[in-house]
Structure formats: C-alpha cells, structure tokens
Image (cartoon, grey):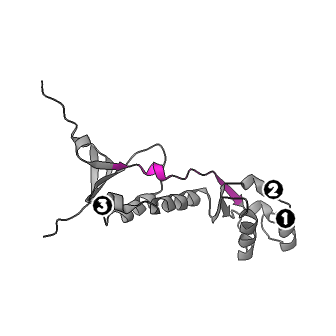
C-alpha cells in the first residue's frame, strides 16, 4: 500500500489567522448625545457639571470610543474634556464607534508584528473564520509582509489564492 503524504504539511507554508489580532480588550462607547440638552445642544455649564458628577469607574480598564450620534455640532474642546475625564480610568481612549475602534486596535496589533520572522517564507492569510474582520486588516498584513516574504496567499493551505510571489533576481 502506498504511503499517503501530506504535501500541505511538508510545504513549509505558514498560516496566519488574522482573528488572532482581533482586540481582546473590552470596548465601551461614550456617546455625547445623551449629555446634550434635548440631545441637540451643548450647554457648557450643564455639560461640565454633568461630567464632574458622572460615574467614570464604569470605564475602568476598557478601551473607550468617544463618539457623537446626535445631529449636532460639538465643539472640539468637549471631546477633549470628556477624554480628560476618561483617561485616568480607561485603558485607552480613542475617537470612534465600536467598528472604528475594532479596526484601529486590530491595525495596531498587526503593526506590532515582527516582519523579520517571515523573511523568505510562504505565507497564507487564513480566509473564512468565525469573526468578520475589517478589510483594512487584510491590507495592513499585506503591506507589512509583502516586502519580506517569498509568497503571500489568501485562503486555506489546501486551496489558496495567490496574492504575491517574489520574482527571482538574476
């Protein structure tokens, strides 16, 4: 009987699952809308007083997205003021909704990859998964690895779509 050889296992292909770079920190959103008078107007004195009396502990050790879902013009200092209250409690304060925060944190995690460990390697960026990932993550990993890898593919090791292959220099 002929021995079955797993060519995928012997190929030296490294699979990177971008889900590993998905943010693990708890995300909370601070929306300015309920802090506005009639959810439309920022009255400075009342706004400052409300922030002074707010329960900031609920944001402890969370990544907080500061946003405004009201159809109102908010002065820039208001975002700065809220951020200054959040900063001592939150792990990190960023501007944006949950989707934007997830994207930003994921890109930050990808940026921290050491590209040197992938020099002249054959890489597959895993396709389908359990989490919907932002397109920006796929662009970021491509930008990070293309300069150093031998080849870059998308999909599964048994069924890949070629993205990049280093040409042989003569």
Identify residue for label 3: 119
Residue 32 in view of the camera:
no
Q: Answer whether residue 16 is magenta in the image.
A: yes
* Lateral position of residue 150 relative to residue 22, left or right: left
- Mark 1 lies on a secondary structure that is helix
Inter-mark Cα distance, 3 to 1: 52 Å
Which badge, 3 or 1, is on the more N-terminal residue? 1
Residue 94 in view of the camera:
yes
Q: Quadrant of the N terminus?
A: top left
Q: Which residue corresponds to the image point at 68% horizontal and 54% vertical from the top-left?
A: 61
Estimate how packed mark 2 is, as few (under 14), some (14 to 19) or many (20 or more) residues with alpha carbons within 10 Å.
few
Q: Quadrant of the C terminus?
A: bottom left
Callout 3–callout 2 Cβ contact below 8 Å: no
> Residue 114, relative to residue 76: is it above or below?
above
> Observer-nearest residue: 69 or 21?
21
Q: Residue 111, image x and y in percent?
A: 46, 63
Q: Residue 147, image x and y in percent?
A: 31, 67
* Lateral position of residue 38 relative to residue 136, left or right: right
Q: Residue 50, image x and y in percent?
A: 85, 63
């Amino acid at each position: 009987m002929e021995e079955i050889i797993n060519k995928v296992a012997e190929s030296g292909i490294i699979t990177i699952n971008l889900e590993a770079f998905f943010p693990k920190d708890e995300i909370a959103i601070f929306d300015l809308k309920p802090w506005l008078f009639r959810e439309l107007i920022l009255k400075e004195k009342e706004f400052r007083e409300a922030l002074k009396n707010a329960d900031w502990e609920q944001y402890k050790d969370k990544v907080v997205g500061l946003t405004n879902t009201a159809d109102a013009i908010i002065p820039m200092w208001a975002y700065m003021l809220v951020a200054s209250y959040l900063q001592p409690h939150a792990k990190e304060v960023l501007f944006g909704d949950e989707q934007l925060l997830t994207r930003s944190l994921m890109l930050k995690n990808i940026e921290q990859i050491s590209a040197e460990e992938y020099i002249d390697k054959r890489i597959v960026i895993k396709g389908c998964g359990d989490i919907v990932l932002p397109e920006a993550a796929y662009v970021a990993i491509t930008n990070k690895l293309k300069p150093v890898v031998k080849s870059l593919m998308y999909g599964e090791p048994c069924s890949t779509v070629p993205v990049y292959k280093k040409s042989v220099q003569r």
